[in-house]
Amino acid sequence: MSDRMWRYGIHSLLEILQRNLPETSKHMLCFIEMVSLVLKRLVLSNSALGDSLFEQLGDVARYGMFAAKMDSRHWKFMSQYWYQKAADRHPGSGKFQHHVAVLSQSDPLRTLFYLTKALISVQPFPDTRVTFGRFFNDWANSAPRKITMTTSFIAAHCVLLAGDSIQRFMTLTNDFLSLLPLYLQHHGHQGQHTAYIMSCNLASVFNYGDPAFMAMVSSQSRSGHTPQTNQLGLANQKQAYGVHLTFQTLSVLLQYGNSHNSVPAIHISLAFLCAVVGYLTSQ
């Protein structure tokens, strides 16, 4: 489906119907179901169209969340399903990672994972930084007062991304590292969560894809020398703390390598180190 057909034939009408809710809820749901059926048939008839249609199916399902408050969980699941398919087809697109993150509020670690992926993707999604701010604010207001592995980890990334007190970052990091072993030993099969943790840590090594930092690193790589600027010095300091968090986490994971929860994160870490070594030896 062309962008013009989507914009004027579907999206504009959905916007009009949404603005007039709840009076238009019945008509909106009928329209959503009809459009979803047509888009699914297009996907089945031509798999090459899936690249754009998956996103459009996810968008349509998100409107269903507004139209059917009583059935919003169903539409949320459908929207996540289609956005996830789009993200799997285009892992380098930050836009799709961002879409999945927005719908993952029930799992803060998963949300943080997809937000950081959206920032360091091959094609970063700039709006993610605004979403990051809202995520941290909402999470801070709703997070339990009790210190847990998850709360300490998310708070540490919040402080590091914002460039706040390094002393507070180190305190939160130490809390996280002290609680991680208990989490690895006594939780069920949460290997996916440790994979989220390590991926977020690796994003901090790249300064969360900060454009100025990435541009300076690229310039340094091409010229072979490091420009001496205060901005780069601050960026390098943030990166150093990200490296500290990453490898201290890996150290704990290796100590509990016999736990099935540790294996996915260790695998990600070794794959990252292998890629770094390959890059350095090619220079």
Image: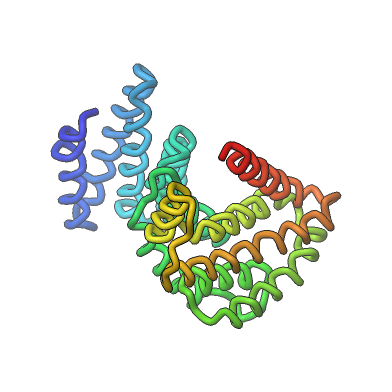
Q: Quadrant of the C terminus?
A: top right
Q: Nearer the viewer, residue 38 or 165?
A: 165
Q: How is the image coloured?
A: rainbow
Q: Name which residue lies at 61% across and 81% down.
A: 145
Whether residue 222 appears in this view of the structure is: yes
Residue lying at the far top of the rendered structure: 45
Q: Name which residue lies at 69% across and 50% down.
A: 265
Residue 42 placement (x, y as % from top left) = 32, 23
Looking at the image, is 220 positioned above or below residue 138?
A: above
Q: Quadrant of the N terminus?
A: top left
Looking at the image, is 161 positioned above or below residue 262?
A: below
Q: Nearer the viewer, residue 163 or 281?
A: 281
Residue 60 placement (x, y as % from top left) = 31, 42
Whether residue 73 appears in this view of the structure is: no
Residue 221 placement (x, y as % from top left) = 47, 49
Q: Name which residue lies at 41% across and 42% down.
A: 93
